[in-house]
Amino acid sequence: VFEDREYVDMFFDNLLSYTRNTTLVIAHLSAATNYSDEEIKHFISYSPRILVNCRRYYTHEWQGSLAHAHLRNVQWLSKNLGLQFSHLLLLASNSWLVRFGGGDYI
């Protein structure tokens, strides 16, 4: 994510509302942002279902950097946290969910 705190809060709420209670959300905070330590702590403690990758990479449109950040999130989950998963959905922070049931298809 790279938006302001209020937007990120709404984005997190959206994801938590439209996904199963067993779904984890992994967030990447772009290194191109200037989030304060307080804001980062806020994101980290937002919900037990939201994990914030402690490694930050620069992201910029049309550079492939978002794909790089997504792949680094997957690496962080598997290597650093030891999480096992069979399915993965990649979303940008401007991709909001609007209907229930996506988990049935993923």
Image (spheres, grey):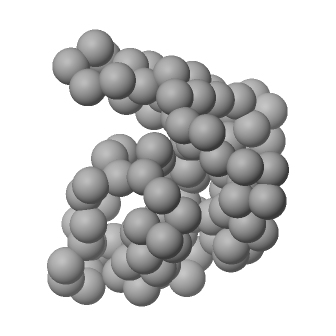
* Residue in the foreground of this view, choosing between 33 and 98: 33
Q: Quadrant of residue 25?
A: bottom right
Q: Is residue 38 visible?
A: yes
Residue 68 at x, y percent in the picture: 44, 20
User: Compared with residue 98, is residue 43 higher up or lower down, i.e. above or below?
Assistant: above
Residue 44 at x, y percent in the picture: 74, 60
Q: Is residue 82 visible?
A: no
Residue 37 at x, y percent in the picture: 80, 50
Q: Quadrant of residue 56?
A: top right
Q: On the rendered structure, is 16 left or right of 102?
A: right
Q: On the rendered structure, is 10 left or right of 80?
A: left
User: Compared with residue 37, is residue 49 higher up or lower down, i.e. above or below?
Assistant: below
Q: On the rendered structure, is 35 left or right of 86?
A: right
Q: Residue furthest top?
A: 63
* Residue in the foreground of this view, choosing between 22 and 10: 10
Which residue is pictured at 43% across the width and 52% down the height? 3
What number of labels is visible? 0
Q: On the rendered structure, is 56 left or right of 3?
A: right
Residue 35 at x, y percent in the picture: 64, 47
User: Compared with residue 63, is residue 66 higher up or lower down, i.e. above or below?
Assistant: below
* Residue in the foreground of this view, choosing between 73 and 79: 73
Which residue is pictured at 57% across the width and 52% down the height? 26
Q: Quadrant of residue 43?
A: bottom right
Which residue is pictured at 25% across the width and 81% down the height? 101
* Residue in the foreground of this view, choosing between 80 and 4: 4
Quarter of the figure that contains the C terminus: bottom left
